[in-house]
Every structure is written in C-alpha cells, then in structure tokens.
Image (cartoon, grey):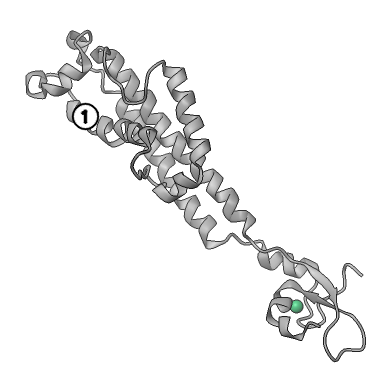
Amino acid sequence: MADQACWVCGRSLNELNAMFRGKTSKESTIEGQEAKVRKDRADFRSASGRWGEGSDTFSQFDFVFVLNNKPQFKKIRYLDDIETAKKGMVDRLGDLRKSRIEVSLGEVPAEELNKQKDFISGRLDAFEKATGRKISAFEGLNFRDGLDYIGKSGLFYYDLQLEALEKSKTTASQERPSGKIEIVKLKSMARDVPVCGVCMGLFKELRE
Ligand SMILES: [Zn+2]
C-alpha cells in the first residue's frame, strides 16, 4: 500500500520527496547571510591581528583615555579602525545586552533575535563570564588589553550571528513540506483512494 502512487497526479512517494528536497528560498537566503558573516569574520580576524603593531609605547595607557584623545595618539596606527570596531560591534553587543531597545546584529534582524531571546541572553551571559566583565565595559583596561578585548568581542559578534542564523535555518527547514500519501474517501468514489499531500490541498473540497 505504501508505495502506491497518488490516484490524482500519479506521483509515487519517492517522486514526491524528490520534489521537496530542494531548499526553500528562506533557507537559501540564510545561507547567503551565513557566507557573508563568515567572510566578515575572517576579514576582521586578520585586520585586528595587526592593530597592536607600533603601539607598544602606549600599551599601558588607559584604553578609554586613548580613544577619547585620538588626536594625541596619531602614532597609533589603526586607531580609527579600532574605534569603528568598538562602536559597530562591541557597543552593539552592549545594546543587545541592555535589550531595552530593538537591536539588530549584523545580518540578523531584531525580530529574529527577539524570537531567540532566551538563547541569545544565555550566550551573552556565558561571554561575560568567560571575559570576566560586562559586555562593552572598557573601564580599567589598558590599551593592550582593550585591543584584546575588542578582538574577542568582535569574533563573538560574528559567532553569535552564525549561531542565530543556524537556528533560524533549522526552523526554516522544518517548514519545508514533505511528501505523503494518504488513503482517503472522496465524494462520489466507490472505494478509498491514495492521494498525495499536494493534491489533498487542491482537492480538499472533494473530501467527505
Ligand atoms: Zn497527487
């Protein structure tokens, strides 16, 4: 009985499953986002690796003090990039932590982050525990340690996006229809007939 074809369209269960095997457009979109985040993560990793170069003289200076007095520290290369990374990623994570405002994170829209609220907040907790400080709190860090902290926070910024995207991809894949063939009674038919899910949707009105 199981391998009989749909009485309406003639498709077998194998044919139906082959039809549904393709990714939904939502899954494809998410995969594109994941690829972008992975590339940005790799770019950030190699860029941030160069930030400490030439700033040994200032390594013990207070990090916040240096950033607040940028014109005085022109000798530190990449200072603009460092500030951009702090504002664009670390402070962003800080906003997300406060969760009083709707925050998106790179490729992940606020709406999706809200759906995963418990997961996200657990990950933020774990990160604070691992670094021993509140997210985006630079107080008391010298320049060298501030750079390390941005490096770690930046990677976390991307990893958190990848984890959130992976979760929404799983949800999207569960929304993908799967093939099924049921034995049903149709109006004006003397016998029960096998009908696939697709045809069932189209011929619902024929069911008794
Ligand atoms: Zn059918």
Toward which corner of the image does residue 46 lie, by quadrant? top left
Quadrant where the C terminus sits is bottom right
Residue 34 seen in the current view: no
- Depth order, front residue of 153/207: 207
Ligand 1: quadrant of the figure: bottom right
Quadrant where the N terminus sits is bottom right
The spot of residue 99 in percent (x, y) is: 38, 38
- Depth order, front residue of 77/125: 125
The spot of residue 168 in percent (x, y) is: 53, 49
31 displayed left or right of 136? right
- Residue drawn where x is 64% and y is 55% of the image: 174
- Residue drawn where x is 20% and y is 19% of the image: 64
Farthest-out residue, bottom:
188
Residue 156 seen in the current view: yes
The amino acid sitting under disc 1 is Glu
* Number of numbered discs on residues: 1
The spot of residue 116 in percent (x, y) is: 51, 43
Toward which corner of the image does residue 202 lie, by quadrant? bottom right
Toward which corner of the image does residue 155 lie, by quadrant? top left
Up the image or down, 133 lies above or below 60; here it is below
- Depth order, front residue of 125/74: 125
- Residue drawn where x is 40% and y is 41% of the image: 39
Q: Which residue is mark 1?
A: 83
Farthest-out residue, left:
71
203 displayed left or right of 130? right
- Residue drawn where x is 72% and y is 80% of the image: 204
Q: Secondary structure at mark 1?
A: helix
Up the image or down, 48 lies above or below 181; here it is above
35 displayed left or right of 92? right
